[in-house]
Image (spheres, helix red, strand yellow):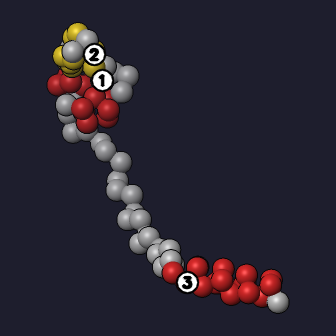
């Protein structure tokens, strides 16, 4: 008798919590980024970042990574 009572109590407690709702399906991924800038337009560029710890400079290299540099610009 006791296991049956525990089972009913467990079912009652579970009924207090709503069922987990399903997430809507993720949207399809968009097309990958492709820069419209030429390598000449992106060459000799730098990104300068100032922080409380100091300033640092990032050289942008369109010859090695044209799409990330174009996306950054």
Identify the mark nearer the N-term, 3 or 1: 3
- State how far apart marks 1 and 2 are (Cα): 12 Å
Q: Is residue 61 above or below residue 3?
A: above
Q: Quadrant of residue 46?
A: top left
Q: Quadrant of residue 73?
A: top left
On the question of residue 48 being in view, the answer is no
Callout 2 crowding tier (Cα within 10 Å): few <14, some 14–19, many ≥20: few
Local secondary structure at mark 2:
strand
Residue 24, image x, y percentages: 41, 72
Between marks 1 and 2 in the image, the one whose residue lies nearer the viewer: 2
| Along the line of sight, the residue nearer the viewer: 32 or 19 | 19
Label 2: which residue? 58
- Please give the name of the residue rendered at 35% of the width and 53% of the height, measured from the top-left corner: 31
| Along the line of sight, the residue nearer the viewer: 7 or 49 | 7
Q: Quadrant of residue 37?
A: top left
- Please give the name of the residue rendered at 51% of the width and 81% of the height, measured from the top-left corner: 16
Circle number at residue 16: none
Label 3: which residue? 15
Circle number at residue 62: 1
* Picture mark count: 3
Between marks 3 and 1 in the image, the one whose residue lies nearer the viewer: 3
Callout 1 crowding tier (Cα within 10 Å): few <14, some 14–19, many ≥20: many
| Along the line of sight, the residue nearer the viewer: 9 or 65 | 9
- Please give the name of the residue rendered at 27% of the width and 20% of the height, measured from the top-left corner: 60
Q: Is residue 68 above or below residue 5?
A: above
- State how far apart marks 3 and 2 are (Cα): 57 Å
Residue 32, image x, y percentages: 36, 48
Local secondary structure at mark 3:
helix
């Amino acid at each position: 008798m006791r296991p049956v009572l525990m089972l009913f109590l467990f079912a009652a407690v579970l009924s207090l919590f709503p069922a987990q709702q399903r997430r809507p399906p993720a949207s399809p991924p968009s097309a990958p980024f492709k820069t419209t800038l030429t390598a000449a337009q992106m060459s000799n560029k730098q990104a300068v970042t100032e922080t409380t710890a100091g300033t640092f400079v990032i050289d942008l290299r369109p010859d090695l990574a044209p799409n990330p540099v174009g996306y950054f610009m």
